[in-house]
């Protein structure tokens, strides 16, 4: 039952998007190592998900979904394409929404490329916490394998979120901007005043 409740689905996306906003911000990182190419199957699956949003005609969710996909489309365009967008992923419900939206937007960006080439996988940032339920950890790895995500993994026993980002920045010198996509709810403690595109808090590294 626990594993079943974690399984991502379009219905989960529908239920959660009304409470989520996408927070996209920039930091100055060099390009990450060239990611493994997305397979035809994973690409096709994500493209099918993106296309399934089009016919959706639900008064409750349609406008929210269009807004989220529009924000992500702008994010890929502004920050330089599929290799420049990273999602925050911990296996939670909000993070699952972000992950599925990113893989859908990622596939659309690859489809629109003028000169098709290798297809980089969607990149997700994961902090492996000591107190995380083993079922959640299993779920993160299972979904990463299923959807062919490139996980940038930090040991949560050694790094908190801010420290991990600082380390990532320190190890990736350069001047090209990178977008980090997070999922938050309007009722979250630090959500007040956040916009669709927002800078990090002053106690965080710049992103």
Image (cartoon, helix red, strand yellow):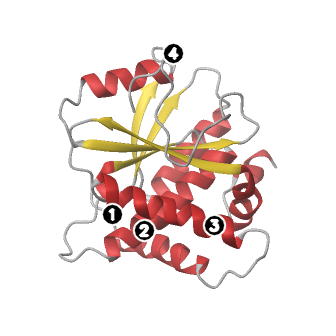
25 or 16, which lies in front? 25
Q: Which residue is mark 4?
A: 157
Q: Nearer the viewer, mark 3 or mark 2?
A: 3
| Residue at screen point 21% across, 49% down | 34
Most distant residue in the top direction: 158
Using the numbered discs, state the Cα–Cα distance from disc 3 to disc 4 in whole angstroms.
35 Å
- Label 3 residue SS: helix
- Counting from the top left corner in percent of width and height, residue 46 is at 48, 70
- Gap in angstroms between the C-alphas marked 4 and 1: 31 Å
**129, 169: nearer the viewer:** 169
Q: Is residue 120 above or below residue 88?
A: below
Q: Is residue 46 above or below residue 18?
A: below
Q: Which residue is mark 1?
A: 38
The residue carrying pointer 4 sits among few (fewer than 14), some (14 to 19) or many (20 or more) residues within 10 Å by Cα, namely few
Mark 3, residues whose alpha carbon is within 10 Å: few (<14), some, or many (≥20)?
many
Label pair 1/3, CB-CB below 8 angstroms: no
Secondary structure of residue under mark 4: loop
Q: Position of residue 9 (x, y in %)?
A: 68, 63
Mark 2 — residue?
42
Which residue does the image show at 69% across and 73% down from the upper left?
Answer: 62
Look at the numbered discs 1 and 2 and tell me whether their residues touch, using CB distance below 8 Å. yes
Disc number for residue 65 = 3
């Amino acid at each position: 039952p626990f594993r079943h409740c974690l399984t991502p689905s379009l219905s989960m996306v529908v239920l959660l998007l009304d409470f989520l906003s996408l927070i996209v911000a920039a930091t100055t990182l060099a390009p990450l190592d060239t990611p493994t190419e997305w397979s035809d199957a994973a690409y096709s699956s994500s493209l099918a998900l993106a296309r399934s949003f089009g016919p959706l005609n639900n008064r409750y969710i349609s406008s929210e979904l269009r807004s989220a996909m529009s924000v992500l489309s702008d994010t890929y365009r502004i920050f330089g394409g599929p290799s420049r967008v990273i999602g925050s992923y911990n296996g939670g419900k909000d993070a699952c929404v972000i992950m599925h939206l990113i893989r859908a937007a990622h596939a659309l960006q690859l489809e629109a490329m003028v000169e098709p080439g290798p297809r980089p996988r969607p990149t997700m940032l994961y902090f492996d916490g000591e107190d995380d339920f083993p079922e959640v950890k299993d779920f993160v790895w299972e979904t990463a394998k299923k959807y062919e995500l490139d996980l940038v993994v930090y040991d949560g026993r050694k790094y908190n979120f801010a420290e991990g980002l600082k380390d990532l920045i320190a190890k990736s010198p350069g001047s090209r901007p990178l977008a980090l996509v997070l999922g938050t709810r309007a009722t979250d403690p630090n959500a007040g005043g956040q916009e669709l595109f927002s800078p990090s808090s002053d106690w965080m590294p710049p992103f």
